[in-house]
Image: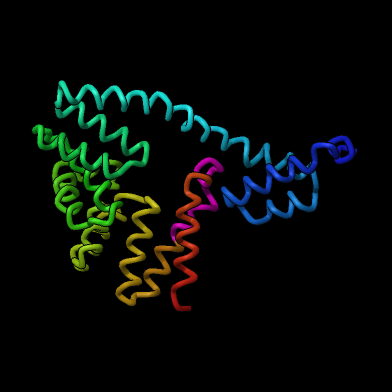
Amino acid sequence: MLNYLLYPFGLALEVLAIVHFIRRRPDTYWIYIIVFLGPVGCLVYLFVVALPDLGLLNNSFRGMPRRKRIGALEVMVEDNPSAGNFEELGELYMDEGNLPLARAAFDKAIAARSNTTDTFYRRGLCAIQLGDPAAALPDFERAVKDDPAHDFHRAQGMLAHAYAQTGQKEKAEAAFRVAVVQSTLSETYLNFADLLASQGRVDEARQWAQKVLNKERTMPSYLRRRERPWFQRASELLKQLPA
């Protein structure tokens, strides 16, 4: 009966549900619910899976005042090139995903005598994401030296990753061993797994990738959605490793 009442809107609901499924890649069983239960299944999917993702739209709305603030700061630093203004500008550029401009802003903040741990750490993040781990390494070393627990111990994991990316395998493993005791970040686990795999230590690499997937069973839904890219990366790594 409900399918009959929803029939005029059934195709639109199915298109919405399938598009969201393709973009967000939730658990596979949802596609069967969408396809075989028709409009009712689509409604269930949209309410249970898609509706919580509406919170992601807030990022789009936040982007407008953020871009306005960026424009204001770009003008402001011409008259007042202070370290604080460049730090804020760099953080906003990072939020926008503009890593080259963020890195340049942090360079200027440091040149203006900023000695804030987070400024060096964020510049390191920009550098390593831009494929320049050699430049990122001293920034991460400084951040970890100043504050070993910085960014919930992510700084320690990124230092280990930078060592690995610059070919310093022994230092990388030692730093990873410290990081995984202090933190359960999926990013750190998977970077460690990548290092182990590159050394041919397949069983150990598989164990750390599996640790990421094991977290999915006990995570609340909102965390599973946030961690989904890491779950996908862990699954891909396990498929690539020899049995």
Q: Residue at x 61, y 51 (%)?
A: 22
Establish if 217 lies above or below 170: above
Q: Report if residue 204 is visible in the image.
A: yes
Which residue sits at x=46%, y=59%?
233
Asked whether residue 213 is drawn in magenta, I would say: yes
| 125 is higher (above) or lower (below) than 74 | below
Q: Is residue 92 on the magenta stretch? A: no
Image spot of residue 36 (x, y percent): 79, 53
Horizontal placement of 200 versus 30: left or right? left
Q: Is residue 224 left or right of residue 118?
A: right
Horizontally, is 21 left or right of 11 in the view?
left
Q: Name the quadrant containing residue 196.
A: bottom left
Q: Image point 32% across, 39% down: which residue? A: 94
Magenta range? 211-224
Tell me if I can see residue 157 in this picture.
Answer: no
Number of disc labels = 0
Residue 39: x and y in percent read 79, 42
Residue at the location (26% across, 40% down)?
101
Instruction: Name the chief secondary structure element in magenta.
Output: helix
Quarter that holds the N terminus: top right
Residue 144 location in percent, x, y? 18, 47
